[in-house]
């Protein structure tokens, strides 16, 4: 359930759980056409990274916060069944860039990404499918978080097939 109008938010499951096989095939075909590739994984990675860039939590959105910083993510594949999440954090006034890489082995995981967009604040948080901990923080946009969760869920399912 998504929070609207001050109602408490609860984690939301990516939409693909309800998608039929035909809808899944159509979604993947649209992504392959959009990113001009015949490879599902390439299209899913490109789409996930484009969404991460679009909904990046930058300092410009953190009005009134004393310690503002840019927070950006990028996904890549390290090997069979391994998704890498690169997190870059840069303070607004400094040149210091903190980079953190996190590997996620997708085998045995529930591929469906849950996310939470609390009614207060400017952040939606995608939860780590391995342990449910906060994983990726993006600008608070319910549709953006849903689209990102859907794309990453499809990517995880694709990696699980490899």
Image (cartoon, helix red, strand yellow):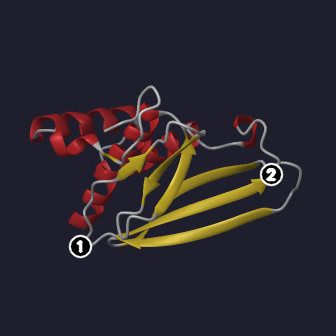
Q: Height in image: 33 above or below 12?
A: above
Q: Residue furthest top?
A: 5
First reached walking from the N terminus: tag 2 or tag 1: 2
The answer to whether residue 44 is visible is no
Asked if residue 130 lies left or right of residue 101, the reply is left
Q: Mark 1 points at which residue?
A: 108
x, y percentage for residue 111? 27, 59
> Which disc number belongs to residue 92?
none
Which residue is at 82% across, 47% downward? Answer: 66
Disc number lying in front (2 or 1): 2
- Return the x and y of residue 86 as percentages of the image width and height: 57, 62
Circle 1: element type: loop
Position of residue 47 measured from the top left corner of the image (x, y, whole percent): 43, 42
95 relative position to 14: left or right: right
Residue 33 position within the rendered picture, expressed as x and y whole percent measured from the top left:
33, 33
Residue beneath label 2, please? Answer: 67
Q: Please say if 162 is above or below 69.
A: below
């Amino acid at each position: 359930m998504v929070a609207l109008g001050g109602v408490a938010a609860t984690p939301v499951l990516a939409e693909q759980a309800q998608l039929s096989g035909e809808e899944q095939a159509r979604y993947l075909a649209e992504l392959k056409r959009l990113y001009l590739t015949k490879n599902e994984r390439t299209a899913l990675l490109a789409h996930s990274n484009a969404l991460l860039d679009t909904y990046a939590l930058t300092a410009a959105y953190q009005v009134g916060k004393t310690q503002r910083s840019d927070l950006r993510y990028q996904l890549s594949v390290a090997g069979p069944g391994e998704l890498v999440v690169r997190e870059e954090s840069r303070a607004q006034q400094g040149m210091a860039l903190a980079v953190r890489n996190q590997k996620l082995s997708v085998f045995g995981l529930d591929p469906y990404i849950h996310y939470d967009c609390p009614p207060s604040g400017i952040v939606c948080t995608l939860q780590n499918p391995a342990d449910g901990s906060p994983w990726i923080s993006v600008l608070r946009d319910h549709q953006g978080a849903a689209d990102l969760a859907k794309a990453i869920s499809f990517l995880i399912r694709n990696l699980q097939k490899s």
